[in-house]
Structures are given as structure tokens and as C-alpha cells.
Amino acid sequence: MRVDKLLANMGYGTRKEVKKLLKGGGVHLDGQPIKDGKVQVNTDEQEVTVHGEIVEYKPYVYLMMNKPKGVISATEDIEHHTVVDLLELEDAVYNPFPVGRLDKDTVGFVLLTNDGKLSHELLSPKKHVPKTYVAKVRGTVTADDVSQFKEGVELDDGYITKPAELIIHEAGEYSQIELTISEGKFHQVKRMFEAVGKKVVELKRISIGPLALDESLEEGEYRELTDEEVDLLQAGRGE
């Protein structure tokens, strides 16, 4: 990789700013000053420093975010704040994108990464990666609803959902439930409950595949996945 591209990707400035940084003598390769941005760097074997600070190169970033209400799962939008807007510059420089979408009024686990291969496999209908939600539902959720969800329910457009696991935590005028689905149709959870005569009034995603949302993350907060979590996600991305 060219050293100017490396530095730009790691957030040391635009190409123009990096060029100025190089010319100023602030960049060293294995202890030797380097001023030519075209010089190739082997990030596995060579050390690049900027004003004495080691440049830690990593090709991919994996972030777990607890998305708040009012924020959309997109990289940019002219009307609303996006999940990317919530990132610190040190993470935003990797140009991560949300894997899948949560509605603007839905909170919970959003995975952001620049790993296109992993994103594709997590989203692929063929992989059946499970996603679990908790919800507050207007209307009494019953054992019959559990059976219907297990068989698959017909949505308003005629689509019949794949089997889903519905757990009732509290039934009543407003029921508290947990639902695990293995697909991601538009507004699917809300439409599934509408299909059985009920309405979702609060919705939160708590897990994607084998990873559960870190309960210590407040809405709007995020953190980088640990190496173990990345391995778990890659190993458990579906059949």
C-alpha cells in the first residue's frame, strides 16, 4: 500500500494534507524519514510513524452501536441524523456502513463495518442469520400467536414469513414479548404483529447472530467489537 493512502485511510488528513505532512519530515518508515507518498509500505512487516506515533493499520473496523430513536441506519441523509454521524472521527475514517437497517423509531443493536464480505453474508437470505428483538405490543399476545409465528404469518403483501420464535414475557393490554426472526423484510416485526391484529409500540433489537447487544451501552453509544466477538460473528453468520 502507498504510504500516502495509508495515512489518509488512517485519518491523518486529506491526500493534500498528507502530502504536506510527508514533505515536512514528520513521517518515518522503519525509523527513516520518508517524503515520497508513492513509497509502498508492507503494513505487516514495516513500521510507519507520524511525529513519533506508530500508525496502527487495520483494514476493517467492526462497531456495535445501541441506536437511539430518531436516527436512521444509513451513511448519509439530508434530513435526518444517521448512525455514521454518531461516530468519532477515528472510527469514521474507515468509512463503515450499517449492516442492514433499523427503522428510525426502533432502537438497539446496529452493526457497522467496512467489511463488505461479512456484511453480504449476514444479510444474505440464504444464510438465515437470526436477529432477536424485544417489543411492547398493544394487544394481548397469546399462545395462538406463538403458534402462528412458528408456522409463518401472511403479511399485507401476501408474503408468508419464515418460522419465527415468539416468547411472551407479559401478556395484557400492552404485552411484552421477545421475537427471533431469520429474515429482514421491510418493517417485518411490525407487519407480523399487524397480521395478527396487534400493534408494536416500542421495538428494540438485542442480538444479531450469536452476538448480543452490550447492556452497558446507552442509546447513542457504541464500541469496537473484540477480536473474540469478530471471530464469533464470522463463525456464526448462518448456514
Image (cartoon, helix red, strand yellow):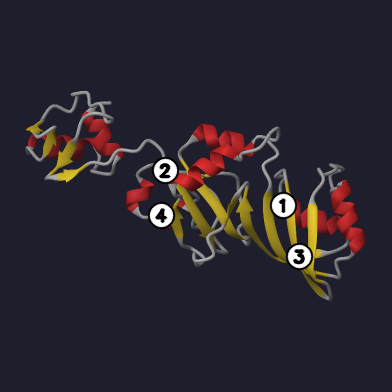
Residue at the far right: name it.
144
Q: Residue at x 70, y 45 (%)?
A: 184
Q: Tag 3's secondary structure?
A: strand
Q: Residue at x 58, y 34 (%)?
A: 120
Residue receiving disc 4: 87
Q: Nearer the viewer, mark 1 or mark 3?
A: 3
Residue 36 visible from this viewpoint = yes
Q: Nearer the viewer, mark 4 or mark 2?
A: 2
Residue receiving disc 2: 61
Residue 78 visible from this viewpoint = no
Residue 187 is labelled as: 1
- For the residues labelled 4 and 2, the Cα–Cα distance comes to 12 Å
Q: Give the mark, 4 or 2, whose residue is nearer the N terminus.
A: 2
Decide: is 195 above or below 44: below
Q: Give the mark, 1 or 3, whose residue is nearer the N terminus.
A: 3
Q: Nearer the viewer, mark 2 or mark 1?
A: 2
Decide: is 111 above or below 173: above
Depth check: give the residue in front, 10 or 159.
10
Q: Horizontally, is 147 left or right of 222 in the view?
A: right
Q: Give the mark, 2 or 3, whose residue is nearer the N terminus.
A: 2
- For the residues labelled 2 and 3, the Cα–Cα distance comes to 33 Å
Q: Residue at x 19, y 40 (%)?
A: 17
Q: Give the mark, 4 or 1, whose residue is nearer the N terminus.
A: 4
Mark 2 residue crowding within 10 angstroms, few (<14) / some (14–19) / many (20+): some
Q: Tag 1's secondary structure?
A: loop
